[in-house]
Image (cartoon, rainbow, N blue to C red):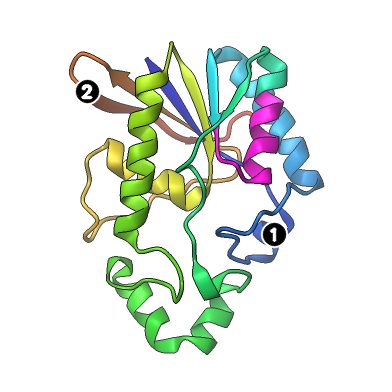
Amino acid sequence: MKIYLIRHGQTDWNLAGRIQGSHDISLNETGRRQAEYLAGGMKKRPVVQIFSSKKKRAMETANAIGASQGVKVILLDGLEEVEFGLWEGMTWKEIQEKYPVEYKIWQKEPAEITPPGGESRQQVYERVGKAADEIVKRAEGDVAVVSHGAALAYMLSYMMRKSLGRHEEIIVENVSISTVEYDKDTGMYTLIELNDTSHLPG
């Protein structure tokens, strides 16, 4: 069974470099075009189910795939973006200026710091891991999962059984497709492709 992990299209906050987190931001014009290109790229990857975060930017992206393939979008708890608390709406430069101590720790070892009022890495890891378990339990064939950059990075870490200690950060671009193969007999995941954006022009 293949699982296509997909990040939503661009938003105005993406463009401005602002942390969205739990804020419910819609796609901008570029993001809507990206979603259409994504739907075209997914035609060679037919799915029987689409699981999506409940945030508008993810649902709008998922709906483009669903409309193209005639597949219903299923909203699933746990696929939402990391909650960044008081850092949401800010750029990293603004965070560095307002929270210099926390920012320094975050840059050196993110697992050791939780944004004020936000989620810890462990909380996110457990949340998206639970969502991944629910997806493979409910999957009836190849599926698409539409979520967010940080949430998908944690899900990939969960699937690949990586620890939350020191490891390279996984960067997931807007409307990128990362393909994971799941073996129901062994419960093992295999990463086939990471961050494919070949469906975008240029």
Q: Is residue 34 visible?
A: yes
Q: Which residues are magenta?
A: 52-65
Question: Could you tell me residue 7's position as x and y percent?
Answer: 55, 41
**In front here: 201 or 102?**
102
Question: Could you tell me residue 150's position as x and y percent?
Answer: 46, 52
Q: Residue at x 45, y 68 (%)?
A: 118
Q: Residue at x 55, y 24 (%)?
A: 50
Q: Is residue 41 above or below residue 5?
A: above
**In front here: 118 or 195?**
118
Mark 1 or mark 2, whichever is nearer to me: 2
Amino acid type indicated by mark 1: Leu
Q: CA distance from mark 1 to mark 2?
A: 38 Å
Extreme left residue here? Answer: 186
Number of the label disc, if any, that sits on residue 58: none
Question: Overall secondary structure of the magenta stretch?
Answer: helix
Which image quadrant for residue 200? top right
- Would you say residue 92 sits in the magenta stretch? no
Q: Where does label 1 land, which residue?
A: 15
Q: Where does label 2 land, which residue?
A: 187
> Is label 1 in a helix, a strand or a loop?
helix
Question: Could you tell me residue 121's position as x and y percent?
Answer: 33, 60
Which image quadrant for residue 174? top right
**In front here: 88 or 181?**
88
Question: Could you tell me residue 137's position as x and y percent?
Answer: 35, 21
Query: Closer to the N terminus: mark 1 or mark 2?
Result: 1
Q: Is residue 113 above or below residue 20?
A: below
Amino acid type indicated by mark 2: Gly
Q: Residue at x 53, y 46 (%)?
A: 148
